[in-house]
Amino acid sequence: MPAILLYGAAFLLYAALAFHFWRTRWRGSSAPRIARWERTAVLAPLALHTWLVYDMLLASQDLRFGFGHALSMMLWLAVIIYWVESRFLELEGMQAPVLALAAVCVPLPALFPGLASPSSAHSIELRLHLVLAMIAYGMFTIAALHALLMTLMEKRLHGGALAGPLAALPPLLTMEQLLFRVILAGFAFLTLTLVTGIAFSETLFGRAMKFDHKTVFAVSSWFIFAGLLGGRYFYGWRGRTALRWTLAGFLALLLAYVGSRFVLEVILRRGLV
C-alpha cells in the first residue's frame, strides 16, 4: 500500500476519534467514562502511526528526519503515553486534544519530507540519539498538555465546581503528582539525549558538540527542567509556579529541534547535519 494512503488513513482515524471524544466529552455537562470499544479504537490509528514511524526512522535507507518527522513522532509517543496512563487513571479531558494534535501531525512527514542526510549520518549512534530525543519530546508533550489542563482546572475551580470532562479528571493533587513523574522521566531521556549528542558529535565530526542555536535551546530546556525538579524537591514548588516552568521548558525544547529544523529545511533548504 502506498505510504500516502497510510498517512491519510491514520489522519482520518485520529480526526474521527478526536471529533467523537470532543462531541461526547467536551460539549456536554458530564463526561462518561471511556468505554472498552473506545480504548480499543484508539489502537487502530496508533498501529498505522507506529508502522509509519518505524518506516521513516529504522526501515528506510534514505534517512530523512525533519521537523515534520519530529512532530509526528512526538505525537505518536504522546498517544502511547496517554493510552497507557488512561488504563490506570481517568483522563477524560485528554482524549480530544491528544488525538486532534496527532491527526494534525501524523501526515506532516508526507507534506514536508525534509532533505536527505549525507551517508555519513546514517549511523546507529545518530538513530539512537534521535530515538532518545523523540522519547523526551513525547514525555514533555504529555507534560505540557497536563499543565494546560491543570491551568484550566485551576481557573474553573475559582469560578465554582468543575463540569464536563474536567470533572472526570483526577483531583489537582493527583494530576500534579502524575505531572512530575512524567517530567522526571522526560528529564532522564533529555539528559541521555544531550549525552549521546556529544558522543555523536565526537564520533562523526571529531570535535565537541557545536554550540549553535539548537544546542542553546536544548541546554536551556535541560536547565529549566532541572530547576523545576530542584525547586519541587527543595522548596515544594507546585501550582502556577510549576506549570509556568513546565510550559517554558517545553517551549524551549520545541524550539531546539522542531523550530530550528523548520527554518533550516523550509527556509534555508539544508539537510539533517
Image: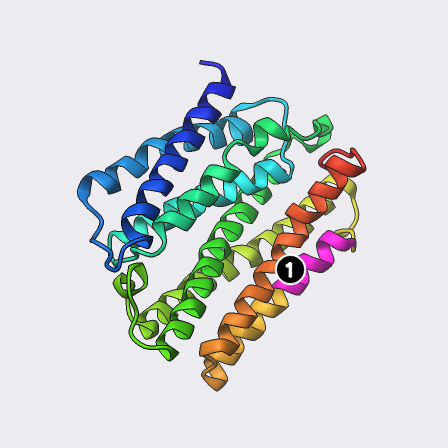
Q: Residues within 10 Å of mark 1 (few under 14, many from 20)?
A: many
Let me know if residue 195 appears in the view: no
Asked if residue 152 is positioned above or below residue 27 in the image, the reply reads below
**What's the residue at 73%, 59% (across, down)?**
216
Type of the residue with mark 1: Ala
Under circle 1, the secondary element is helix
Check disc 1 and report the residue beneath it.
Answer: 252
Dominant secondary structure of the residues highlighted in magenta in the image: helix
* Picture quadrant where residue 249 is located: bottom right
**What's the residue at 37%, 77% (across, down)?**
159
Looking at the image, residue 11 sits to the left or right of residue 223; the answer is: left
Residue at the extreme top: 1
First to last magenta residue range: 212-221
Let me know if residue 91 appears in the view: yes
Q: Give the x, y percent position of residue 82.
A: 36, 50
Looking at the image, residue 213 sits to the left or right of residue 135; the answer is: right
**What's the residue at 27%, 48% (across, down)?**
24
Q: Nearer the viewer, residue 177 or 151?
A: 151
Q: Give the x, y percent position of residue 269.
A: 78, 33
Q: Is residue 217 magenta?
A: yes
How many circles with numbers are drawn on the protein? 1
Looking at the image, residue 43 sits to the left or right of residue 263; the answer is: left
Quadrant containing the N terminus in the rendered view: top left
